[in-house]
Image: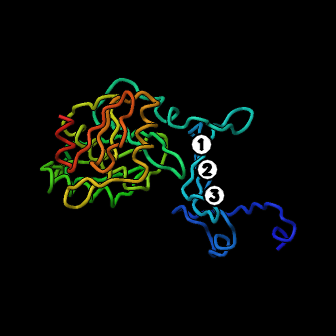
Amino acid sequence: RMAKASNVATFLVGHVTKEGGIAGPRVLEHMVDTVLFFEGDGSRRYRVLRAIKNRFGAVNELGVFAMTDGGLKEVANPSAMFLSGRGEASSGSAVMAAWEGTRPLLVEVQALVDRSPAQPRRVAVGVDPHRLAMLLAVMHRQAGIPVVDQDVFINVVGGVRIVETASDLALASAIYSSLRDSPLPMDLLVFGELGLGGELRPVPYGEDRLREAAKHGFKQAIVAQANAPKRAIVGMKVNAVKTLSQALDLLT
């Protein structure tokens, strides 16, 4: 009441549970206009400010900050920051363009596939483990990629959490690369949603994602056919495909 009567912005700080949700009654989340999660740990220099709820703007907006001796400083180009640690081409690495709030963000997805001595394990850091299990089933059934007896470990570099389905093709490409021990080109971008029938579905803001990648030196991309840009993107060759099998054929 005080905030509304005086027209003053007010911050309420609450705790989170071990699962990452707001602790206690949900009244704190319901009464405010915006819910912000401040993420990061002591082992990382970077902190992420993520909007989960926003009455007057986009949700899942992402702000990236660097912890310096002078306090938190905004990272103006987070895509360059998340890709800065990439060295020479290595198997099991793919780059995708995620959409965070109102802007594209280039992130690296890593996969490690290795023969399991016992019950195969599925470990996912930064992506939904249930989504990973579904993708592995699609790869096996629709593209003939056997991973039944393989351990599969997934990691999104930089501590980013990807919640959108545009990561499907990047995950499948990284897994395929690791299984074959064949690095993907360093200038390749992949994104797209996979259906249970192995079809590649378009995702929103496809052309904006491609242009962001082109600005960072990416020369080629694999996307869903419906995400093919209407106008050519300078310096980039875009391969538009209909199915997962066609996408994987371009990686061989």
**Image coords of residue 122 (percent x, y):** 30, 53
Toward the top, the furthest residue is 88
Mark 1 Cα shell of 10 Å, populated few (<14), some (14-19), many (≥20): many
Q: Given contact means CB atoms under 8 Å apart, are the residues at marks 1 and 2 in contact? A: yes
The residue identified by callout 1 is 64
Q: Residue at x 35, y 23 (%)?
A: 88
The residue identified by callout 3 is 36
Amino acid carrying mark 1 in the image: Val
**Image coords of residue 102 (percent x, y):** 54, 50
Earlier-in-chain disc, 1 versus 3? 3
Q: Given contact means CB atoms under 8 Å apart, are the residues at marks 3 and 2 in contact? A: yes
Q: Quarter of the image holding residue 75? A: top right
Mark-to-mark CA distance, 1 and 3:
13 Å
Q: Quarter of the image holding residue 20? A: bottom right
Q: Residue at x 56, y 39 (%)?
A: 43
Amino acid carrying mark 2 in the image: Leu
Earlier-in-chain disc, 3 versus 2? 3
Q: Is residue 212 left or right of residue 146?
A: right
